[in-house]
Amino acid sequence: MKVLLCFEILAILLYLLIDRTTQLKNKSWQIRTGLLLIMALVVLVRVYKFWLTMGLDLDEAMGGYNAWSISKYGVDMMLKPLPVYFYAWGSGMNALYLYLAIPFIKLFGLTLSVYRLPMVLFSILAAFYFLYALLKTNWKDSNIIILMIILFLSPAMITSSRWAVESNIFPSLVVVSTATMILFLSSEGWKKSLLFVLYNVFLGISAYAYSNNWLFLACATPLVYGWLIFTKKVNIKQVVIGVTTILLLVWPLALFMYVNYISHKELQVLGLTITKMAISRGSSQFALGNGVVGIWNNIVAATTMMVTGNDGMVRVELPIFGPFYPFMLVFAIVGLFKKVSSKFNDLDTYMLLLLLASIPTFVLILPNFVHYNAMFVPILYFEYVGLQSILDTKFMKVSFLVTMAVLLSLFAKSYLVTNAAELHDGGIEVSSDVRNAIDATHKFKDKKVVFVTRYGKQYYPVVLFYEHISPEKFFKTREKLKPADHLEYSYFDKYYFEGNLDNLKISKNRVYIVQNNVGLDLSKFSKSKSEIYGTYTVYYY
């Protein structure tokens, strides 16, 4: 409750700041109150039990440990100083979110709530910045309300803001860059030039958010620049400054590409590590294995996923609801056709360019909604455009508000109740109960600790996350493996990891943390003592 209260106070302060710096203060009390309630709801759905509802994702554990390692020792788990792309599992991990988390870890230590905090906070700040941009550019009141609801209270934007796999920050970066573009398009003089530089800063740092979206950025940037130049919204000087800004930010990633695709030799430049990966991540993300047939099959699979709203990962989309609410994708198609048959305004054009830039991703990259998160904002925007065409009376607008309230309520029930167990301890999520089980082994200081879970050897980042093992100790004591795209260590230090009990010899010199309810034959522990910690049992002698 204290965390929720702090965020709501932050929301009120941000709202008051917007009130003082825009035309919001001159609007009717109904509009001001309505927007305040919407923003309070935007905060609530992101903050409520964000540290508890979902278990620790294995990628969160990996990212959190590496961020902690950099914050405390200046190196990652592989003893690399300030990597521009983290080695992590072997095929890499995006750097931006990990570096954003470091100040929070420095201040509060490494816990699940602390590691998720920057994601939650950034998504909230992005929503307020977007509201500021709409108000500053004098959008129609009803349009602001509809767009804010569609964009920030849709499942895609809610779920991606509540857990800290590092790529989830990309949709909020699209929101921030879009808000900056809105302000840029309505500004003049030095403010316009400054906003264009800021826009390019966001473009540049977005490249560090999610490597799967490099293809999207490589398409979106020339499309947007071409449009701005063709319509004379920027001059040559602004173009040069903008391109220079991007290059100043992304040159380490250019070197990263050189190291991994040409030289195959790791570099140290200006204190940064240009990391050599075990294997290119692209080889496991692109649907290029079977040529044209593979690409066609990928398009069919991607289309099916978008229509059904199901990619098989509950942590990204809930059954029935999907990322865009049932049937809401239809309005995006309606909105797109509506604009094609009428006149585009500047924001329509910008969003269309983002959507066009997503097509190569849709065609070439294996479908799931994390891989496609660059599409969230433009799709939701065209949902808003499509809904605009029917929300032309007071009755229809009230009906829309009631419908969205019902959908959000049902979604919340599905998230917090119906699918709670799956979110907390399903897929690659690890129940928070394991923290207590690990703590219980501390009294057995001279004994090795064996984890027997359905995750098998993938489990090791969880122990690194909770036990705060120094990177040097991990590096020296880990199992020696050949480079691979997904390294899974069966041991390091005193910790061992198993996926079953079949070949496990029980020893009185070891403590066993066993995951419950995964079909294991526990007769081997019949003579041991045990302590139950939720979904885990600790066995010892």
Image (tube, rainbow, N blue to C red):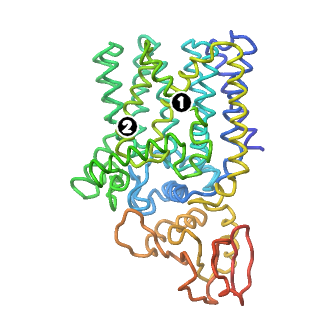
Task: Identify the amino acid type marked 2.
Answer: Phe
- State the quadrant of the N terminus: top right
Disc 1 residue type? Val
Left or right of 174 in this view: 13: right
- Asked which quadrant contains residue 507, the reply is bottom right
Determine which of the numbered discs, if any, sits on residue 17 in the image.
Answer: none
The secondary element bearing badge 2 is classed as: helix
Alpha-carbon span between mark 1 and mark 2:
23 Å
Looking at the image, is 202 positioned above or below residue 184? below
Q: Nearer the viewer, residue 456 or 472?
A: 456
Determine the residue positioned at 64% across, 21% down: 145
Residue highlighted by disc 2: 216
Q: Nearer the viewer, residue 315 or 294?
A: 294
Look at the numbered disc 1 and give the secondary structure of its residue.
Answer: helix
Disc on res. 330: 1
- Where's residue 540, x and y in %? 69, 84
Depth check: give the residue in front, 13 or 264.
264
